[in-house]
Image (cartoon, rainbow, N blue to C red):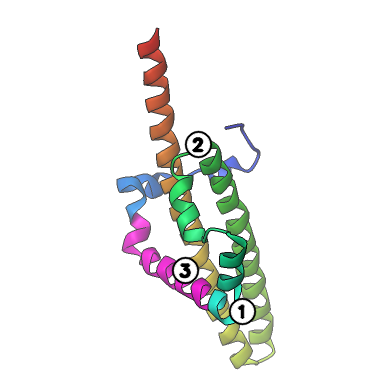
Amino acid sequence: MKKRITDGYFKPKSFEKWRNGRIYEYLGVKYAKKGVFAFGKLMDKITGQDKINKERGIESIYKRQIKDLRDIGRLEKTENLTRITEAIHLFLAISSATFGAIYLSYGRNGSASLNGALVAFNLYLLSLQRYNRQRINNLIDKKNKSHSSTQLKDL
């Protein structure tokens, strides 16, 4: 993978590497992940997207994720996608915090509370992306190690 300017921020921190990223599991990120997928499936049913995908022969995202585990190129693309998604949630959290502070300064406590909830929600989704990226990086490292050891055996 090539070096990027943003690697300093996106590179897993030492506490994130603890027990292969299990810190996020203790924070309940796995439950958020299940909730996000359940919400996605529900939206697919409501909008009829599941039927459209079936008619077009498009695999569900859930089946595609299993295939992604086998290919380093797809893993790296998925890792990059977690960076993009995390940046979006970081922007939304900062924006919500800013608007919440503005609303609070004008005494609009209801709006400030809603923005506070949005900050918490986006920070949780941001941590989900960091959790996924740590797991993806672990898989990439394992695949690279097994690939390099296979090349050494061939010599």
- Mark 2 / mark 3, whichever is N-terminal: 3
Image-based side of 127 in relation to 108, left or right: left
Q: Amino acid at mark 2?
A: Ile
Residue 96 x/y as whole percent: 64, 74
- Asked which secondary structure carries label 1, the reply is helix
Contact check, label 2 and label 1, Cβ < 8 Å = no
Residue 115 x/y as whole percent: 60, 81
Residue tagged by mark 3?
Answer: 37
Per the model, the C-alpha gap separating discs 2 and 3 is 23 Å
Q: Amino acid at mark 1?
A: Thr
Residue tagged by mark 2?
Answer: 72
Image-based side of 20 in relation to 59, left or right: left
Q: Quadrant of residue 111?
A: bottom right
Residue tagged by mark 1?
Answer: 47
Q: Residue drawn at (62%, 62%), measured in percent from left and top?
A: 56
Residue segment shown in magenta? 23-42
